[in-house]
């Protein structure tokens, strides 16, 4: 087919069309539900309608009579096999695979049915009779805190309190706040939401003729799965082969290991046939990793002229029935310490207390580095509230408190070392592009006419690229990442990495990095990920860590290949190694450009005429990042609010990002568009809501809302480039910036529109009903 | 129940349970896995296929028996004569896809849209695609892709050599 | 989903007759709308299977009933729990038997329902109507039975 | 999910469909567009023993301009949306609805009559049918009968179509020129049921006074509700800002919505008024009248 893209220039920064697209465009992507094995059975899971109840009895007899049903397993069966619980990646808790004794959240897994067809599996699940005795429901962390009902008697400490985490100087912060001329405080809730990738989670488990587990699964971290499964099932790790095929979006949802996966493996083992389990949309929304649900009390202190004096944040986190947050072991609240944001805060204190409730487990990073979105939203919202208190322009307050260019590397009072940045430059570019002055004039006129127009800012900084081994691990495994590069005789090659693309375009960007470093054609650099038999061990793709960590590993592995190649080049050029230099994508004799060989020629020689050198041309690198990277940006939203209906129209949205070196602008823009759309959804329509009875009210796409092309605004983008000093190619990672930075911009714009009415805060999602009631109440209060 | 459904020009005769959804028929009986399933509520549009050439339908909100005797086009039927369809080319050129899961349905909805409106404005494209959800792209490049496709498709076909 | 209902029935029979009727599991069970089967366990406990159906939503609910008669106050409370359609429902109903002129009886009833699971999430509006119907109809049927 | 098993009957004529429904009674459902029924079946909330598929019934696949407008049971929403004459001011109400009901793909399967029969409390076509004073053609044992929409819409998800009966078509009366309507819907996103919606249909006399008025609300009760107080207030009057305000007020009063994820009771009641007033203004504007 005439769908091979023609050769393109290799250099970084090229808008190279994605190499992976042709297969997706032709419906030839290979997602987990596309995998079909001979004799494959289907699994369906019986779930609890009760959020909290003891299980009196489970009767599977009727289910076993259903035509096509092969077996039904319950928690008792699993417990007998020692598979009753699985550790959460967090390492601080474990999760029931199938409920034993009692259920702790609505839609919790209670039994699994295996059958010849999907339909028969559901028929069987429907026929399983479970008797429950309802127990009192704990539907929020504040009720949980009272410990009147202990949800997890299985734990040593008989309390719903999971952990207390804090950072910073509590007393100094308190003193600084006391003595601050200006102080604002606000309870800010980042609502529970869900990544909801369009492809639900699923797997196919199969024990091959060698008795080896072939496990196809929608996993953002296949190697960690392999290790986790070895620990849970006791199957030796060499007997487990995890394959993560094409993934239809992950956004953090596909990081944890879910009970359905364990059930499928048990079914395959028990029945000696492959078992496929694909969750329904309802199962995805009600039982797999949710995000956020942080109740944050934020306090800012400032001098009369608007210099920040202190920041204090106290958070109650709702973790649901199990602490399944996929945070690094030492960071139960993730990177929340970045809550000082882009500002030079002299003293600060942040603490998080997490609680069990009768809700689905999770607390994963929904398109963000662990808990960075919550932190970024808190500080960016609080800055606007402070600006309002001080009566100064929100932009001026930010400008005044920005960490200055010359302060980098900047050590924040909460312990991070920001690698690089020029916040003023990015802000100024944004103001110029949006035409801030003209907008302010328009707003003034509109306000004079009683119309509600708002301009909202978010000048966020996030922390990504977990992370340095001295701080970061998942289940004890350090958060390095890896790459292996092989160059073939004809100058083509393959790069394998421990990451796993879910649409980020690794097959293109990884090839571009190699092409840049080796002067080869990226079209002929194959990228392979997601197969634990072939890829080097890596921690996977989430928390914007692929480019900062694996991207670095690839660049360094490529440079090792180049070092080896240099020796062979010297042999071909008949000079000493020291006389050869890499210039303009080829090796040449120093000072004699005419005498040169290309990498392609060297590659051929590596297999045909290596001279005194070891044959072959390949290298591996396991990269342990010296520090995190700190992408940042200035986002501006312009909105009009309809007084009568509460409708918010996002008229314009500008994102100016700085993610350091840009590998592929086409892909970076795409990432930003997508992240902004998700931020827009979170700001205006997304919430996983539970009623007081513990019922999940947003169990499918008719109530958990994803915006369509019609609601989604048009995006304007621009960027500045401030490379990361410690990253081999200066790249910082970008996939999550737009989702981290945009919610505050949207909400700040709405509040700016309502500020003439004296409104200071409104909780997300900013629904029409909420806006209308806020306006009505504010007007009533002024009368 | 016996059904005969022409999919991308090929007749598939199968004996199916009436409750078999068209989407599963295409995926599991015809082994055309480009048609995806993302929800149970006719909301996401990952399963959109073209029925009888001029109708975009959500194949997981329809039973295979309803398609008996009808003509279905799936994403696998878009490319002709070894060349990508202008819509596919547009999505590629404009980076109109990321994870690729919504892409087949999105392109087939666009196919029917352009059949009815060969020269849609951005607003008309956004309206026409509002039955398909995408989580990755923020829609902007999809709109560009469809615009590009419309322009290409409006060109008169080059005379055969 | 938490729902509240209340209503009143005028019954052309004396309170004693009404009381005797509402404290008889078999009789009460027989008054359930679209009741498919009733299994009486003892004087205060019985199970029943009732058909539910509003528009496209149709199915069966298996319900456990517990009668809690308060002789002195002439008040009958009913605890109903069970489920169907992959969901759970908990109902409580109460009826005060109040003497009315001419040897008649006024029956003041209240009811509340808690719905859980897919039905509550997907078919909320439908099931609201359903639970209401279940309670309303039951007491209406009590009047009917005592009228003829 | 996969629906529970059912018997499938494909009807090729209205007679076949009717016969099949007579045979299976309460356990059968008619399958037209299926855009509400199939999802309900996938959750196994709906589990009919038999489905009578009328999509192959050619004689019901029509949209006829016959003085009025008659839409057959298998005519799709999109067929209305794309009808060449739909942009005529007379049919502006239906045109509005055809562009906001469900989503553009669902509309290519969904049918107008099917949505009337489903009678969702937050339906769009039901509300428009009330405002336009449509009638539904129902076939029963004693032959065909035309049921005025007010009698047709009985209760949530319940209509005058009895067991074994079938709705064959809906008829919107023609009211000549000087007639225009408007459908105003607030929805959380495309494809959502209405948070609140108002359908308005106005016919003017030569002297500019209002000859006939239809005002109905969606998501304001057990099923679509007419606002007679508003209609009576409007008829015979010259349209003015005060008159519109009064009609809107009546609508807001009449609205008895349920609080749900779409909004609070007070918000929905408020919207009822706002949307009726916007609808009246737009309908009048379409007749070249500013009020």
Image (spheres, coloured by chain):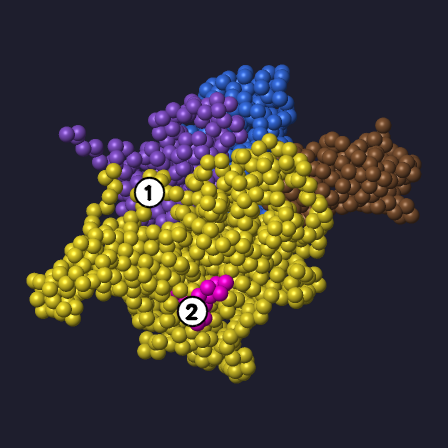
Report if residue B19 is visible in the image.
yes
Q: Give the quadrant of the N terminus of chain A.
A: top left
Label ID, residue A469 = 2
Give the colour in which the image draws chain C.
brown
Up-down relation of residue B101 to residue A426 (above or below): above
Spot occupied by residue B143 in the image (x, y as percentages of width and height): 33, 45
User: Which region shows up in magenta?
Assistant: A463-478
Which residue is rendered at x = 18% and y = 33% of the image? B158
Disc assigned to residue A23: 1
Q: Which hue is chain D drawn in?
A: blue
Mark before the other along the chain sequence, 1 or 2:
1
| Chain that is coloured yellow in the picture | A
- Reply yes or no: does residue A475 show up in magenta: yes
Chain ID of residue with mark 2: A
* Residue B145 spot, x, y in % from top left: 30, 44
- Left or right relative to A751: residue C64: right
Chain whose colour in the figure is purple = B
Tell me how far mark 1 sits from mark 2, CA to CA.
37 Å
> Where does the image place residue A599, in percent across and percent down from the top left?
18, 58
In the image, residue B3 above or below residue A407: above
Residue located 28% across and 37% down the image: B85
Q: Is residue A291 left or right of residue A584?
A: right
Label 1 marks a residue whose chain is A
Q: Residue at x 84, y 34 (%)?
A: C27
């Amino acid at each position: 087919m005439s769908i091979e893209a023609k050769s393109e220039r290799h250099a970084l920064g090229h808008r190279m069309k994605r190499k992976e697209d042709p297969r997706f465009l032709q419906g030839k992507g290979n997602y987990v539900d596309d995998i079909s094995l001979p004799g494959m059975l289907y699994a369906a899971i019986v779930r609890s309608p009760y959020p909290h109840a003891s299980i009196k009895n489970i009767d599977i007899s009727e289910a076993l009579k259903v035509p096509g049903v092969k077996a039904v397993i319950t928690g008792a069966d699993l417990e007998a096999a020692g598979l009753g619980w699985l550790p959460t990646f967090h390492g601080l808790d474990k999760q029931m695979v199938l409920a034993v004794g009692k259920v702790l959240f609505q839609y919790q897994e209670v039994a699994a049915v295996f059958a010849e067809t999907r339909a028969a599996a559901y028929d069987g699940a429907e026929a399983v009779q479970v008797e429950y005795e309802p127990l009192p429901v704990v539907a929020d962390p504040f009720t949980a805190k009272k410990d009147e009902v202990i949800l997890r008697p299985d734990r040593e400490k008989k309390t719903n309190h999971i952990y207390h985490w804090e950072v910073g100087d509590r007393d100094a912060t308190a003193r600084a706040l006391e003595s601050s001329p200006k102080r604002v405080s606000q309870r800010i809730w980042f609502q529970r939401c869900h990544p909801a990738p369009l492809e639900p989670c699923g797997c196919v488990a199969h024990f091959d003729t060698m008795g080896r587990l072939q496990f196809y699964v929608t996993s953002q971290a296949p190697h960690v799965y392999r290790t986790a499964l070895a620990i849970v099932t006791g199957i030796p790790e060499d007997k487990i082969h995890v394959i993560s095929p094409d993934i239809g979006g992950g956004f953090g949802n596909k990081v944890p290991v879910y009970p359905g996966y364990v059930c499928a493996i048990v079914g395959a083992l028990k029945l000696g046939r492959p078992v496929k389990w694909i969750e329904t949309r309802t199962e995805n929304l009600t039982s797999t990793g949710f995000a956020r649900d942080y109740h944050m009390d934020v306090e800012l202190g400032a001098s009369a002229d608007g210099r920040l004096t202190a920041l204090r944040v106290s958070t109650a986190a709702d973790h649901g029935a199990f602490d399944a947050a996929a945070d690094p072991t030492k960071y139960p609240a993730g990177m929340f310490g970045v809550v000082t944001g882009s500002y030079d805060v002299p003293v600060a204190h942040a603490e998080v207390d997490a609680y069990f409730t009768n809700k689905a487990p999770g607390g994963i990073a929904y398109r963000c580095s662990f808990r960075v979105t919550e932190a970024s939203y808190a500080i960016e919202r609080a800055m606007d509230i402070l600006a309002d208190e001080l009566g100064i322009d929100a932009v001026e307050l930010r400008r005044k408190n920005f960490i200055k260019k010359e302060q980098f590397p900047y050590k924040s009072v909460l312990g991070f070392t920001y690698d690089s940045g020029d916040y003023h430059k990015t802000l100024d570019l944004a103001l110029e592009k949006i035409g801030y002055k003209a907008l302010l004039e328009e707003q003034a006129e509109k306000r004079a006419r009683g119309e509600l127009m708002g301009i909202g800012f978010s000048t966020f900084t996030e922390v990504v690229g977990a992370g340095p081994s001295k701080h970061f691990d998942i289940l004890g495994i350090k958060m390095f990442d890896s790459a292996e590069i092989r160059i073939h005789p004809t100058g083509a090659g393959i790069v394998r990495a421990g990451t796993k693309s879910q649409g980020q375009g690794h097959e293109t960007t990884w090839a571009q990095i190699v092409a840049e470093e080796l002067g080869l054609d990226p079209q002929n650099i194959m990228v392979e990920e997601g197969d634990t038999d072939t890829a080097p061990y890596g921690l996977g793709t989430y928390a914007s860590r692929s480019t900062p960590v694996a991207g670095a590993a690839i660049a360094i592995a490529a440079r090792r290949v180049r070092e080896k190649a240099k020796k062979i080049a010297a042999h071909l050029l008949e000079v000493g190694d020291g006389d050869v230099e890499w210039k303009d994508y080829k090796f040449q004799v120093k000072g004699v450009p005419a005498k040169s060989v290309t990498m392609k020629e060297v590659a051929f020689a590596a297999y045909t005429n290596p001279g005194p050198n070891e044959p072959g041309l390949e290298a591996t690198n396991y990269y342990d990042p010296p520090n995190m990277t700190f992408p940042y940006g200035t986002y501006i939203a312009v909105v009009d609010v309809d007084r009568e209906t509460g409708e918010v129209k996002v008229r314009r949205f500008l994102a100016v990002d700085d993610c350091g070196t840009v590998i592929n602008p086409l892909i970076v823009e795409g990432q930003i568009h997508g992240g902004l759309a998700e931020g827009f959804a979170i700001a205006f329509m997304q919430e996983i809501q539970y009623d007081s009875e513990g019922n999940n009210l947003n169990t499918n796409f008719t109530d958990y809302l994803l915006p369509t092309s019609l609601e989604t605004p048009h995006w304007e983008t621009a960027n500045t480039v401030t490379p990361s000093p410690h990253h081999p190619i200066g790249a910082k990672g970008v996939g999550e910036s737009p989702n981290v930075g945009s919610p505050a911009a949207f909400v700040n714009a709405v509040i700016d529109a309502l500020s003439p009415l004296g409104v200071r805060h409104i909780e997300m999602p900013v629904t029409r009903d909420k806006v209308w009631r806020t306006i009505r109440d504010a007007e009533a209060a002024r009368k | 129940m016996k059904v005969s459904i022409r999919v991308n020009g090929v007749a598939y005769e199968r004996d199916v349970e009436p409750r078999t959804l068209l989407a599963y028929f295409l995926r599991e009986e015809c082994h055309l896995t480009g048609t995806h399933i993302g929800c149970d509520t006719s909301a996401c549009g990952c399963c959109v296929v073209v029925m009888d050439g001029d109708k975009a339908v959500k194949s997981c909100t329809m039973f295979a028996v309803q398609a008996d005797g009808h003509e279905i086009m799936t994403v696998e039927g878009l490319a002709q004569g070894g060349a990508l369809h202008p819509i596919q080319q547009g999505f590629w050129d404009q980076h109109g896809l990321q994870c690729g899961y919504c892409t087949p349905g999105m392109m087939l909805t666009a196919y029917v849209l352009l059949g009815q409106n060969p020269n849609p404005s951005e607003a008309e494209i956004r309206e026409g695609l509002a039955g398909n959800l995408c989580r990755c792209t923020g829609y902007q490049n999809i709109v560009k892709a469809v615009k590009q496709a419309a322009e290409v498709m409006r060109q008169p076909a080059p005379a055969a050599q | 989903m938490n729902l509240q209902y209340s209503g009143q029935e005028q019954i052309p029979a004396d309170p004693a007759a009404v009381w005797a009727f509402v404290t008889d599991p078999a009789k009460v069970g027989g008054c359930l709308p679209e009741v498919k089967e009733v299994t009486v366990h003892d004087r205060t406990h019985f199970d029943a299977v009732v058909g539910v159906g509003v528009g496209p939503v149709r199915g069966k609910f298996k319900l456990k009933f517990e009668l809690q008669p308060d002789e002195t106050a002439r008040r009958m409370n009913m605890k109903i729990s069970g489920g169907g359609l992959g969901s759970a429902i908990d109902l409580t109903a109460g009826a005060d038997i109040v003497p009315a002129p001419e040897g008649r009886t006024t029956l003041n009833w209240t009811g509340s329902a808690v719905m859980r699971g897919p039905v509550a999430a997907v078919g909320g509006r439908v099931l609201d109507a359903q639970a209401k119907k279940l309670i309303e109809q039951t007491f209406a049927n009590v009047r009917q039975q005592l009228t003829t | 999910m996969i629906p529970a098993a059912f018997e499938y009957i494909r009807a090729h004529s209205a007679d076949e469909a009717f016969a099949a429904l007579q045979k299976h009674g309460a356990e059968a459902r008619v399958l037209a567009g299926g855009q509400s029924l199939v999802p309900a079946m996938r959750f196994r909330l709906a589990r009919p023993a038999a489905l009578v598929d009328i999509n192959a019934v050619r004689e019901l696949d029509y949209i006829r301009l016959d003085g009025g407008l008659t839409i057959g049971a298998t005519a799709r929403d999109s067929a209305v949306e794309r009808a060449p004459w739909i942009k005529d001011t007379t049919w502006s109400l239906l045109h509005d609805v055809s562009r906001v009901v469900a989503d553009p793909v669902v509309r290519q399967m969904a049918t107008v009559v099917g949505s009337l029969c489903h009678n969702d409390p937050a339906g769009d076509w039901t509300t428009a049918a009330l405002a336009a004073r449509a009638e539904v053609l129902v076939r029963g044992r004693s032959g065909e009968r035309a049921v005025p929409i007010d009698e047709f819409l009985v209760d949530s998800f319940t209509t005058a179509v009895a067991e074994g009966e079938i709705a064959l078509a809906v008829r919107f009366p023609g009211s000549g020129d000087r007639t225009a309507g408007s459908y105003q819907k607030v929805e959380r996103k495309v494809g959502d049921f209405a948070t609140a919606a108002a359908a308005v249909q106005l016919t003017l006399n030569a002297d500019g006074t209002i000859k006939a008025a239809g005002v109905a609300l969606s998501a304001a009760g057990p099923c679509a509700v007419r606002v007679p107080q508003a209609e009576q207030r409007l008829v015979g009057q010259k349209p003015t800002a005060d008159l519109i305000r009064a009609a809107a007020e009546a609508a807001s009063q009449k609205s008895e919505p349920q609080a749900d994820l779409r909004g609070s009771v007070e918000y929905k009641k408020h919207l009822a008024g706002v949307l009726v007033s916007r609808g009246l203004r737009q309908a009048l504007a379409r007749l070249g009248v500013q009020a």
